[in-house]
Image: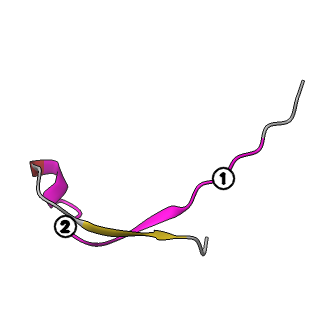
Amino acid sequence: MPVISSSACAKLILLGEHAVVYGEPALAVPFLGL
């Protein structure tokens, strides 16, 4: 069986985390430090 490896960055939501539920914008940036 072949070995598969993947990675993804986390996100840091600066503001608007709950607003996106109602279709409003939010400010988020990728966080590569984890």
Local packing at callout 1 (Cα closer than 10 Å; few below 14, some 14-19, many 20+) is few
State the image coordinates of residue 16 (x, y, percent, origin top left): 19, 67
Q: Say which mark, if any, is on residue 29.
A: none
Seen in the image, is 4 located left or right of residue 20?
right
Identity of the residue drawn at 60% across and 75% down: 33
**Residue that carries the numbered disc 2 in the rendered image:** 16
The quadrant in which residue 29 appears is bottom left
Q: Is residue 21 above or below residue 4?
A: below
As drawn, is 2 to the left or to the right of 14? Answer: right
- Residue that carries the numbered disc 1 in the rendered image: 7
Q: State the residue at coordinates (33%, 68%).
A: 28
Q: Which range of residues does the magenta coloring cover?
A: 5-21
Residue at the right extreme, as displayed? 1
Quarter that holds the C terminus: bottom right
Which three-letter amino acid code belongs to the residue tagged 1? Ser
Count of numbered labels shown in the rendering? 2
User: x%, y% of residue 6?
Assistant: 70, 47
- With 22 as the anchor, is 26 left or right in this view? right
Secondary structure category for the residue under label 1 = loop
Question: In the image, is residue 8 part of the stretch drawn in magenta?
Answer: yes
Q: As drawn, which residue projects farthest toward the top?
A: 1
- Check whether the beta carbons of the residues at disc 2 and disc 1 lie within 8 A of each other: no
- In reply to whether residue 16 is colored magenta, the answer given is yes
User: Amino acid under label 2?
Assistant: Gly
**Sequence-wise first label, 2 or 1:** 1
State the colouring used for the structure image: secondary structure
Residue 14, position as x, y percentages in the image: 29, 75
Q: Which residue is depicted at the point 77% across and 44% down?
A: 5
* Residue 24 spot, x, y in % from top left: 11, 57
Q: Name the secondary structure under disc 2.
A: loop
